[in-house]
Amino acid sequence: MRLLIRYFFRGVRLVLTPVMLTAEKLSTPTRSVERSAEQQALVDEQCRSLALYQFRACPFCIKVRKELARLGLDIELRDARHDAEHREALEAGGGRVKVPCLRITHPDGRDEWLYESDEIIAWLQRRFDTAAPQAA
């Protein structure tokens, strides 16, 4: 029975994955937040200390990637499903293999692991959204 259930869900995932990725492609914003060249260079520099651990077809990861596109952020995407090295780093640093997870490397070298798509999006908006009021 377990084997039947396992294969059922694999089949569902096999059918839904291309649908979800196509929907992401069609609904991802093509225009991002407008910044001057200097501002964008500063944002790009700040993004070098960030990495998003994700699964390609995870709906919560898709939600975060859409926000990255809207904000015009060039954050490294790390596939924690198909790349054993990234998966191990996520488990060792964050404590569990759960995606999406934003790894924030602070200037002092300390890593912060931020889970939950809504929390990641809120953090990104506070840090990079020019339309949102900036927190102190």
Image (tube, grey):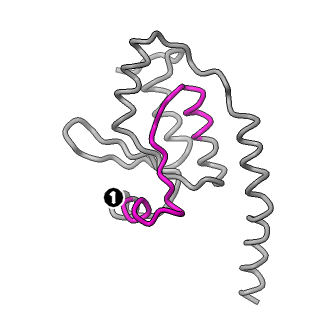
The residue pinned by badge 1 equals 93
Furthest toward the bottom, the residue is 1
Residue at the spot 33% in from the left edge and 58% down from the top edge: 93
Of 107 and 26, nearer the camera is: 26
Task: Give the percent coordinates (x, y) of residue 116.
Answer: 52, 48
The x, y position of residue 115, in whole percent, is 47, 50
State the extent of the magenta-drawn residues as a range. Answer: 64-89
Residue 62, compared with residue 58, is above or below; it is above
* Residue under the point 44% across and 12% down: 37
Specify the farthest residue to the left: 108
Q: Amino acid at mark 1?
A: Gly
Q: Which residue is painted at 46% across and 26% down in the image?
A: 126
Image quadrant for the C terminus? Answer: top left
Which quarter of the figure is the N terminus placed in?
bottom right
Residue 84 among those drawn in magenta: yes
User: What is the quadrant of residue 23 in the picture?
Assistant: top right
Reply yes or no: does residue 1 show up in magenta. Answer: no
Q: Is residue 30 left or right of residue 115?
A: right
Total tally of numbered discs in the picture? 1
